[in-house]
Image: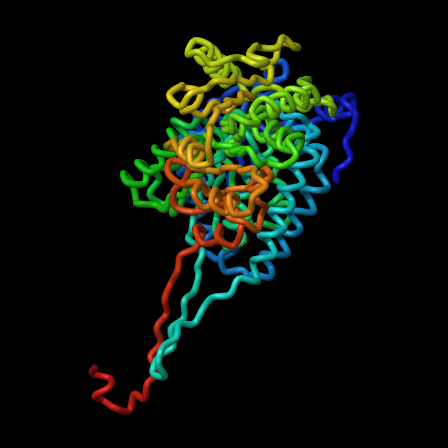
């Protein structure tokens, strides 16, 4: 477990940070070719942190050219897998050595509570990169069961130039989820971070090259989605795009692929995830703890947030009482204060969007149990943890992803009704179920249309389990686990004739 510092210590680290501002292309920081920049804003107080290079098509062209050169000459793609592993392990060591800088930088730019970044995000980032580094020389290819006249090998080869388009809610961890398997497989990787949170991605790329990653193998292009992201999506020499973000934006990358080179596209998109609590659920205090964590962790800015609490009418009152009691432990405060459980919303735009959802819920008749207001703190973007009861299936709050600290409570009378309500969504990323009956648990887990279902707990699994969604929550592949490597590789069949070729007839056939 990482050791937390004091608020004063984190503030001192922040004051001494060297904030990266340039794009990282072919082993060096540089301005965008058009000289344009965009402001990185501190959500905790609204102040401007830095002006980041705003890349456009020319920068994307240059980065892809360098990535293709690196891939084709084999400086990484043809390196022995064991040597790739050693470099990636050294990369992890450098990340660990620079932990204080990276943790503080991420909290500063994202508004996330520093305690959460220190003890969860950074720890899991290292675990992910180390795990995928170790797979580099441990994933075996296959031999098909042919007759004696042939040998058929089924081999994986790196797909080529990969673009990873990141969200702003878990900047370092989502970068690790993507570059871990992509680099382990031997690809050249271009990262397009979210414009709200670009700096840790830039610093990580610099540290990767310091660890021995060859020039051009990992590059970072900050910029806005409609320019930089679009240029990545439409580029004819990018072989694959892995995207995490909203379903709305994910659709664009499918269109970009169709309009360019039919590049492979993997999408991990939105969620409106259910937490189903049946009347035989055990220990409602623990259920309340999981329900709160599921929706208020990272201020609800989490695609796997259980924002719909679907609870049986017989225990609803008792569960709500426990939830409201435990919510007192969730203090909102400055992200650098280690006692803060809730920090700042990532941007003014997201802040206003969440408040608009809250206003609409009130207008549509949902009952506000707690919260519902902005918090005036140092000029930053803070919102009270908010809970609505009497939410119906037709309300906007039950249909749309809020991506904020807002919980909707929906009442059911049976397990079958709970399944129906839980599946009544265009999304299918995660779900949680709470029941003391093993048969019910199995039935629920199999009936819910979601990529991950947790039973009597909340979570996403770990690096060994695939993460992705059904329906409009996902497309084309999964993050994490061995399965993540499949999307960054091409599968090739090599068929070798080993028959007796002295027989001309056999040859003719």
Quadrant containing the C terminus is: bottom left
Report whether 271 appears left or right of 203: left
Quadrant containing the N terminus is: top right
Is residue 113 at least partly visible in the picture? yes
Give coordinates of residue 58: x percent, y percent. Answer: 40, 33
Nearer-the-camera pick, 393 or 210: 393
Q: Is residue 284 above or below residue 351?
A: below
Nearer-the-camera pick, 366 or 58: 366
Report whether 260 appears left or right of 168: left
Nearer-the-camera pick, 90 or 342: 342
Q: Is residue 252 above or below residue 81?
A: above
Q: Residue drawn 54% across and 43% down?
A: 177
Q: Which of the 4 image quarters holds residue 500?
A: bottom left
Give coordinates of residue 124: x percent, y percent. Answer: 63, 42
Give coordinates of residue 17: x percent, y percent. Answer: 69, 27
Q: Is residue 489 above or below residue 36?
A: below
């Amino acid at each position: 477990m990482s050791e937390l510092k004091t608020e004063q210590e984190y503030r001192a680290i922040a004051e001494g940070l060297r904030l990266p501002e340039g794009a990282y292309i072919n082993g060096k920081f540089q301005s965008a070719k058009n000289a344009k920049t965009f402001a990185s804003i501190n959500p905790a107080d609204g102040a401007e942190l830095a002006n980041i290079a705003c890349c456009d098509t020319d920068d994307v062209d240059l980065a892809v050219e360098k990535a293709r050169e690196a891939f084709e000459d084999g400086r990484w793609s043809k390196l022995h897998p064991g040597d790739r592993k050693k470099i990636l392990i050294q990369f992890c060591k450098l990340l660990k050595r620079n932990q204080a800088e990276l943790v503080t930088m991420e909290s500063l730019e994202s508004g996330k509570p520093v305690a959460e970044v220190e003890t969860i995000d950074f720890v899991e980032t290292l675990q992910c990169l180390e795990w995928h580094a170790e797979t580099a020389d441990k994933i075996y290819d296959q031999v098909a069961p042919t007759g004696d006249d042939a040998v058929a090998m089924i081999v994986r080869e790196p797909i080529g130039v990969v673009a990873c388009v990141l969200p702003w809610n878990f900047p370092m961890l989502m970068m690790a989820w993507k570059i871990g398997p992509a680099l382990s497989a031997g690809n050249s990787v271009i990262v397009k971070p979210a414009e709200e949170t670009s700096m840790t991605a830039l610093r990580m790329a610099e540290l990767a090259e310091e660890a021995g990653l060859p020039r051009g193998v990992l590059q970072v292009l900050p910029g806005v989605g409609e320019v930089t992201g679009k240029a990545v999506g439409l580029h004819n020499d990018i072989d694959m795009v892995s995207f995490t973000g909203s379903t709305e934006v994910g659709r664009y990358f499918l269109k970009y692929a169709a309009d360019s080179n039919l590049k492979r596209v993997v999408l991990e998109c939105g969620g409106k995830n259910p937490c189903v609590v049946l009347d035989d659920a055990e220990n409602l205090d623990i259920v309340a703890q999981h329900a709160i964590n599921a929706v208020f962790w990272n201020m609800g800015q989490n695609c796997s947030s259980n924002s719909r609490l679907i609870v049986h009418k017989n225990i609803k009152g008792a569960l709500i009482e426990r939830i409201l009691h435990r919510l007192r432990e969730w203090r909102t405060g400055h992200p650098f204060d280690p006692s803060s459980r809730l920090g700042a919303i990532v941007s003014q735009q997201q802040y206003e969007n969440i408040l608009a959802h809250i206003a609409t819920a009130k207008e549509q008749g949902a009952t506000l149990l707690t919260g519902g207001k902005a918090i005036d703190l140092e000029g930053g973007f803070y919102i009270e943890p908010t809970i609505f009861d009497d939410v119906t299936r037709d309300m906007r709050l039950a249909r749309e992803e809020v991506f904020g600290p807002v919980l909707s409570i929906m009442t059911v009378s049976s397990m079958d009704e709970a399944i129906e309500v839980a599946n009544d969504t265009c999304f299918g990323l995660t779900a949680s179920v709470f029941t003391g009956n093993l048969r019910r648990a199995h039935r629920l887990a199999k009936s819910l249309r979601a990529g991950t279902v947790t039973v009597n707990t909340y979570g996403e699994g770990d690096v060994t389990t695939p993460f992705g969604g059904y329906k409009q929550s996902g497309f084309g592949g999964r993050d994490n686990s061995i399965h993540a490597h499949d999307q960054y590789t091409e599968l090739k069949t090599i068929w070798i004739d080993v028959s007796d070729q002295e027989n001309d007839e056999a040859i003719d056939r």
